[in-house]
Amino acid sequence: MNITLQTQTPPTGDLIIPVVQTDLTSQLTDLSQKLTLPLPILQRDFKADAKEVFTVYKADGFKTYLLGVGANPKAMDWLRSFRKCFFDQKGKLSTQVTIDLSQFEGEVVESVVLGVRWGGYDLKLYQTDKPDTPVFFSDGGQLSILVSPGTETVAQEALIRAEAIAQTQRQMLDLMNAPANYKQPQTLADWAMNSGKQHGYSVTVLDKAELERQKLGALLSVSQGSDVPPVLIITDYKPAEATNVLTIGLVGKGVTFDTGGVSIKTSSNMHLMKSDMGGAAAVLGTVEVAAKLKLPIHVVGIVPATENAIDGRSTKPGDVITSYIGKTIEIIDTDAEGRVILADGLGYMVRHYNPDVLIDLATLTGSVIATLGYHAAGLFTANDELANKLTEVANQTGEHLWRLPIWDVYTEDIKSDVADVKNFSGKPVAGAISAAKFLEVFTENHPAWAHLDIAGMAFADTEFGSQKNATGFGIRLLTSYLQALIAESR
């Protein structure tokens, strides 16, 4: 499906008109004349609620869809409304579709395009009897976006960003939704290598032998119970011409399947643990998008990737291991493995790259879900400026963050009798906070570090399937954060 910007409505095809609830009576009055429908019918049957669709058949056989986007819609409202509309209607759309955004600012094009692209996502990755691709989402499909004269430049920039993000995010959705027998740590490494070659950034993969040589003991300890070897993936995008740019370090948890290890999980939802690489998806995706957009900022992404399986060789509760930076860790719970591999990822990032800003993302704790539900990720940082900027960007993209405390009083929860720290407090409270305090140890007092616990956001209930599936959370957030830093530096 091809997307172009237009300032005039094409003569044929389906038309989609988004409607906000502000000044609704005036809008419906204009639409009743345009659609030759009695105003009372429109007022009775269409309220412009978010995701609400009202369909009118035209004399030429094509359709006009009125799509409600709610009151005062923000970026995520636009995205979700268009995503659901195109997902629900994809089999009914004609080859030619026009979206009329002529009454809106050019920036809204980004969210709309992301919603449209996402609406064509197919979760049936391995089904053998799938129906044919809907004609609109086939190679012959054409989407025209109608914008008002004078907004073309802003709209075109938004379209370019959206297309770059959408293509990458789709690949991340496929990786996250893939089961463990289709997705191993090396699968993530291969994806990164191919992406680096295609988009011009450096990728280094440390295999098991190299991890042993460089003594990344925390990552190795988690991998011991699996026949699948771990890797450390290092992606490094540096703009070719820019000088004196900021270096942003991103670290993402890449557990391709998590049984819990010896502290084994219950079986009821263990199959969803193929999603335990949401942080890796955010980091890999963001680096690729930065490279595709040629952003004038240095971005380093590190992903410690492994399975957490169970075997006679598995790390056991009570074991003491040594991390990359030399800190020893008492393993209290082998199901608190994400923070353990991140310890080596963070340590490696600080020791080798010393970034200006350090951000890690992980599907880390059920505790953060108990606190924030499925509507926001937990944000942990002692840096107020960093917290404010990330929150500001999150509010713009709709990938919400909520700051939680990381006070030193919580350090008590990770004190060990036999090692430098322990990986689990053992308490039924403040689990997300104690996990963040654990990670803080391995940042070596980095002044601009933030931890994002995305456990409730990386996998969610959507229209794509009957079970939770991938969201690609973090790619839009981090990309917007990078762009905000660039704008501030100019």
Image: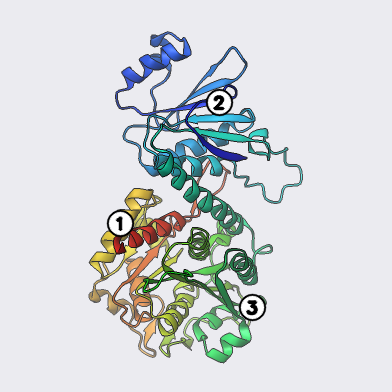
Residue 229, labelled with which disc? Answer: 3
Element class at badge 1:
helix
**Label 1 crowd (10 A; few <14 / some 14-19 / many >=20):** many
Q: Which residue has dot 2 on it? A: 10
**Label 2 crowd (10 A; few <14 / some 14-19 / many >=20):** some
- Residue 466 image point, x, y percent: 57, 43
Element class at badge 2:
loop
Give the residue displayed 46% in from the left and 75% down from the top.
Answer: 342
Q: Amino acid at mark 2?
A: Pro
- Residue 81 image point, x, y percent: 46, 36
As measured in the structure, the alpha-carbon distance from the residue carrying label 3 to the one carrying label 2 is 54 Å
Furthest residue toward right: 128
Q: Are marks 3 and 2 in contact (CB under 8 Å)?
A: no
Mark before the other along the chain sequence, 1 or 2: 2
Instruction: Residue 168: tell me if it is visible.
Output: yes
Residue 275, labelled with which disc? Answer: none
Q: Exactly how many numbered labels are in the figure?
A: 3
Instruction: Residue 428: tell me if it is visible.
Output: no
